[in-house]
Image: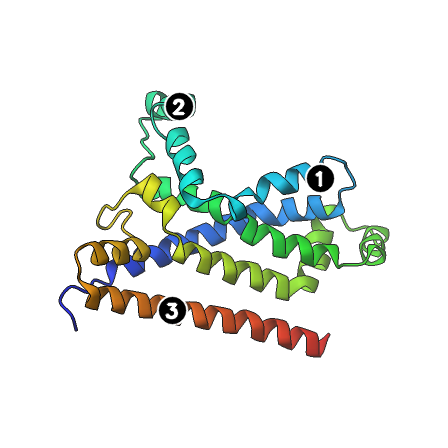
Amino acid sequence: MNPGFDIEPFLLSFRLAGITTFLLFLICVPLAWKLARSRSWFKPIIEALVSMPVVLPPTVLGFYLLILLSGRSPFGMMLKQQFDIDLVFTFEGILIASCVYSFPFMLQPLQSGIEQISDELVEASYTLGKSRFQTLFHVILPNIKPSILTGLIITFAHTVGEFGVVLMVGGSIQGETRVASIAIFEMVELMDYRTAHIYSMLLIAFSFVVLMTVYLINHHHRKTG
């Protein structure tokens, strides 16, 4: 194997993606439920705001996250003064950035799945004495398993492939913020194309498996539904 190859960026990418996916699932489930059931005129505004990472250039989002998390912002200054926490160029910093950037990729499939649940099923659950919490976790979520799996898989894959936001907030620190996509960029800069090919082909194979999984899940759901 090429001596320039290093498995650590992939392990770091998968660690970042795993934690990001877990946190976003916990955050987005109640929010998706709230948005799906809402009839407020604020709903389109909130949906537009949380979907901004889909259309914003990663460098723009990364730049403002860098400002927010650095000591130049009130938030960054508060963290430094009160808790002695620096988030820029740390794993925790790129974790926050990844959560922001991948947020809509988790939220939208969950919200879409919940919106397909009939009002009659929800009302029947309430009639049987179940609370909103019980209805969500015992009635709604079991009926949107394809949406849940799609959200989990796409969020994980999207985080693994992220480059711009992670680079802006975390830079490239070995074992801390140097994820696989950044390692590819560095190999190209060093003109080590052989190692860049290895990294790239691994990510291509990973992306193909992810997309195949999503399509198989949706195909199976359509056949059984």
Residue 139 placement (x, y as % from top left)? 73, 59
Q: Secondary structure at mark 3?
A: helix
Asked if the residues shown at circle 3 and circle 1 are in contact, with their CB atoms under 8 angstroms apart, the answer is no
Name the residue type under label 2.
Ser
Q: Secondary structure at mark 2?
A: loop
Judging by the rendered image, the residue that carries numbered circle 3 is: 204
* The one of 129 and 60 positioned closer to us in this rendering: 60
Judging by the rendered image, the residue that carries numbered circle 1 is: 43
Q: Nearer the viewer, mark 3 or mark 2?
A: 3
Asked if the residues shown at circle 3 and circle 2 are in contact, with their CB atoms under 8 angstroms apart, the answer is no
Judging by the rendered image, the residue that carries numbered circle 2 is: 73
Residue 137 seen in the figure: no
Q: Quadrant of the C terminus?
A: bottom right
Name the residue type under label 1.
Lys
Q: Nearer the viewer, mark 3 or mark 1?
A: 3
In the image: residue 4, left or right of residue 179: left
In the image: residue 90, left or right of residue 49: left
How far apart marks 1 and 2 lie (CA) works out to 29 Å
**Callout 3: few (<14), some (14-19), or many (20+) C-alpha neighbours within 10 Å?**
few
How far apart marks 3 and 1 lie (CA) works out to 37 Å
For the point 43% across and 46% down, the residue is 98
Q: Give above or below for 71 relative to 43.
A: above
